[in-house]
Amino acid sequence: MVGELVEVRVGNVGHGGFVVGRHEGRAVFVRHALPGELVVARVTEGSEGDRFLRADAVDVREASPDRVEPPCPLAGPGRCGGCDWQHATPPAQRRLKAAVVAEQLLRLAGLDVDVTVEAVEPEALGWRTRVQWAVDGDTVGLRPH
């Protein structure tokens, strides 16, 4: 299945920058998509018998009103992987991150709380709270994923 294209309408956001949809009865965790969008996604992980697939949105058929052109030219499917939400407006990024935290608190701790992610200045770019590096021999860097 890796490399195949699937059309999927995605719904809720999940931990790790994925948005969750369903295709042929299986969960599909799609990167580079936003809740409510209809996308064509290229499968990046999963086989016929698996319960879920991972995929990258490569074509947006019905876009979210929160979708913007990423300011970083390296953001997007098959690129560096360091800009998980640059295709969303900054307010949408905060809402999505708050939804992930709220869902995790409910699922793991049984706490049903409202979560607010406060804006920081500068609001859009120039700061980061985490980074994941790929290491291959003597080479360290961001990687496509």
Image (cartoon, grey):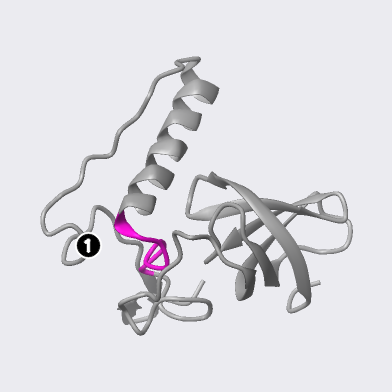
Name the residue furthest left.
121
Report helix, strand or loop for mark 1: loop
**Residue shown at 50% from the left, 31% from the top:** 103
**Residue shown at 53% from the left, 77% from the top:** 77
User: On the image, which quarter does residue 73 sit in?
Assistant: bottom left
Does the rendering let one see residue 79? yes
Question: 49 or 4, which lies in front?
Answer: 4
The vertical placement of 3 against 12, above or below, is below
Question: 48 or 115, which lies in front?
Answer: 115
User: On the image, which quarter does residue 45 sit in?
Assistant: bottom right
Q: Look at the image and give the residue range highlighted in magenta.
A: 82-90
Question: 22 or 139, which lies in front?
Answer: 22
Does the rendering let one see residue 43? no
**Is 81 positioned to the left or the right of 108 in the image?**
left
**Residue shown at 38% from the left, 38% from the top:** 98
Amino acid type, callout 1: Ala
**Is 14 positioned to the left or the right of 70 in the image?**
right
Predominant secondary structure in magenta?
A: loop
Q: Is residue 84 magenta?
A: yes
Q: Position of residue 5 (x, y in %)?
A: 76, 76
The vertical placement of 21 against 47, above or below, is above
Question: 17 or 49, which lies in front?
Answer: 17
Q: Is residue 49 magenta?
A: no
**Is 20 positioned to the left or the right of 34 in the image?**
right
Q: Position of residue 117 (x, y in %)?
A: 28, 39
Residue at which label 1 appears: 124
